[in-house]
Image: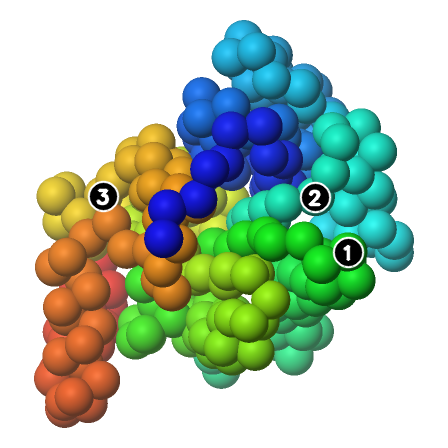
Amino acid sequence: MPREIHGKSIIVTGASSGIGAATAIECAKAGMPVVLNARREDRLRQVAEQVERHGVKTAIVVGDVTDTGISESLLDAAEIELGGLYAVFSNAGYGSELPVLKTEMDQVRAMFEVNFFASLELVHQAARRLVEQSQPGHLLMCSSCLAKFTMPWHGVYSATKAAQNHLCLAMRSELAGRRIEVSSVHPVTTATEFFEQSARRSGKGKRSDVLEHVPKFLIQKPERIARAVVKCLRRPRPEVWTSTLTRTFAAMATLSPRLLELVMRQQMRKMNSA
């Protein structure tokens, strides 16, 4: 059934740019007060100005999603400054462009801490508060199309996103009787600074292999994902996809691992020849 979201608050992590910023603004257009979180305060304040132009309140919580107590601070901001907790969009995360064998274990753990464990902590604590207050709500995680299949040099990143996807599916069933929706969001390649940062972490400067090899028609703007998130908030569903073609490929890759293997080998040949 459709849900009324006007006047109901949402927490958005990773809100200083890209999908997070676009989603915060789109939620504001729908009349939702927004708690903005990221590490860059100056960028957050710029986003807050755009959000407030749509006549809604904002609260800013600066910090890394792995900081001790950050989840409580975000939830408190929603309840105290914005009048109540309704939705969470756990969007903060990062990637790398390295083969598994060249990724150190501390790098693997660090990515899981940000992409998975911090997301789990936030939605876990949000769900507990909603249950204790007998309130409906909606919890979303920004996963990836790579939650359903993987690609060379992105194994660790896709593993964190697959973990998010599985968590959302389980929590959706577990919380169904409490009027708490849980959804995973599966963007395809998105034109944001994500890939520049990923390339830097991989020692490639600003040059990203992803944007060079992905067909242009599969590169989307963050506003497209933001609109899909708001649509899901209004009409909840288990997963949010913005590319039918990619979703179809994900299903085919699940049915035929051999197909995925062929695609991955072709991708490896392209990367090795670059």
Q: Quadrant of residue 37?
A: top right
Left or right of 68? Residue 37 is: left
**Residues packed near mark 1 inside 10 Å, few (<14), some (14 to 19) or many (20 plus):** few
Q: Position of residue 165 (x, y in %)?
A: 45, 71
**Residues packed near mark 3 inside 10 Å, few (<14), some (14 to 19) or many (20 plus):** some
Left or right of 181? Residue 154 is: left
Residue placed most toward the observer, 29 or 198: 29
> Residue drawn at (60%, 17%), measured in percent from left and top?
56
Q: Position of residue 260 (x, y in %)?
A: 18, 81
* Amino acid type indicated by mark 3: Ile
State the residue position of label 2.
85
Dot placed on the residue nearer the N-terminal end, 2 or 3? 2
Dot placed on the residue nearer the N-terminal end, 1 or 2? 2
How much space separates mark 1 and mark 3, taking CA atoms?
Answer: 41 Å
Q: Nearer the viewer, mark 1 or mark 2?
A: 1
State the residue position of label 1.
133
Disc 1 + disc 2, Cβ < 8 Å: yes
Q: Position of residue 8 (x, y in %)?
A: 60, 35
How much space separates mark 1 and mark 2, taking CA atoms?
Answer: 10 Å
Tag of residue 264? none
> Residue drawn at (45%, 26%), measured in percent from left and top?
30
> Compared with residue 235, is residue 46 higher up or lower down, i.e. above or below?
above
Residue placed most toward the observer, 216 or 205: 216
